[in-house]
Image: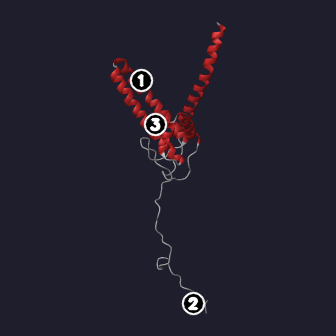
């Protein structure tokens, strides 16, 4: 008797006991949008190094121009130095906050860098700790690094290594040169 009358198939929309099919979470893009002049979003370790390098390369001529004005007028040069210094600090803070967002930490933790010894260790941790590969509360992960980002980050690391080697080698050389005279 059961084989003769198959059971009715009730569609999910027709029954009030069906699981809801509503979208309850927003759909995030696969990768986040890169924005340099905001504290929203995320950037990875290499992009943090590359953007810091670009910031340094951009601020050097600006400080040079301000220094030129300082030679002409101490007041005007000093004012330009302050304006350029504040602008560089603001952009550096924006980049640092985005790096902390990639790790999953609040941007307010960037204030830890103001503490004398702890700040140096914390800055090093920002370079070492990898960001989360999935979306976190600050948005989707950053896009993959381009070749330019990799080259700029490598250049920044090379400058740091050359500076450390020079800081060690020059005093030793000066002692050697003085002993030979």
Residue 143 shows in this picture: no
Estimate the x, y position of residue 142 in percent, counting from the top left: 51, 47
Estimate the x, y position of residue 118 in percent, counting from the top left: 55, 37
Residue with the mark numbered 1: 64
What secondary structure is found at the residue carrying circle 1?
helix
Classify residue 86 as left or right of residue 5: left
Q: Nearer the viewer, mark 2 or mark 3?
A: 3
Residue at point 59%, 91% (across, down): 4
Q: Are marks 3 and 1 in contact (CB under 8 Å)?
A: no
Residue at point 48%, 49% (across, down): 32
Estimate the x, y position of residue 66 in percent, counting from the top left: 38, 24
What secondary structure is found at the residue carrying circle 2?
loop
Quarter holding the C terminus? top right
Residue with the mark numbered 3: 92
Q: Nearer the viewer, mark 3 or mark 1?
A: 3
Q: Are marks 2 and 3 in contact (CB under 8 Å)?
A: no
Estimate the x, y position of residue 58 in percent, counting from the top left: 44, 31
Classify residue 72 as left or right of residue 54: left
Examine the rendered structure and indicate whether residue 45 appears above or below residue 12.
above
Q: Earlier in the sequence, mark 1 or mark 2?
A: 2
Structural crowding at the residue carrying mark 2, measured as other residues with C-alpha within 10 Å and reported as few (<14), some (14–19) or many (≥20)? few
Residue with the mark numbered 2: 5
């Amino acid at each position: 008797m059961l084989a003769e009358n198959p059971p009715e198939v009730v569609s999910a929309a027709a029954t009030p006991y069906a699981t809801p099919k509503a979208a309850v979470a927003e759909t995030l893009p696969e990768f986040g949008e890169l924005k340099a002049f905001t504290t929203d979003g995320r950037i990875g370790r290499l992009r943090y190094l590359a953007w810091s390098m670009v910031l340094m390369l951009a601020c050097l001529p600006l400080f040079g121009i301000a220094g030129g004005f300082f030679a002409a007028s101490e007041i005007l040069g000093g004012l330009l130095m302050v304006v350029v210094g504040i602008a560089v600090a603001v952009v550096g803070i924006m980049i640092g906050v985005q790096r902390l967002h990639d790790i999953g930490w609040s941007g307010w933790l960037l204030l830890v860098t103001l503490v004398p010894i702890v700040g140096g260790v914390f800055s090093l941790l920002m370079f070492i700790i990898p960001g989360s590969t999935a979306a976190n509360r600050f948005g989707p992960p950053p896009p993959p690094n381009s070749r330019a980002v990799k080259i700029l980050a490598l250049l920044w690391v090379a400058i740091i290594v050359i500076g450390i080697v020079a800081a060690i080698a020059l005093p030793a050389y000066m002692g050697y040169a003085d002993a030979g005279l």
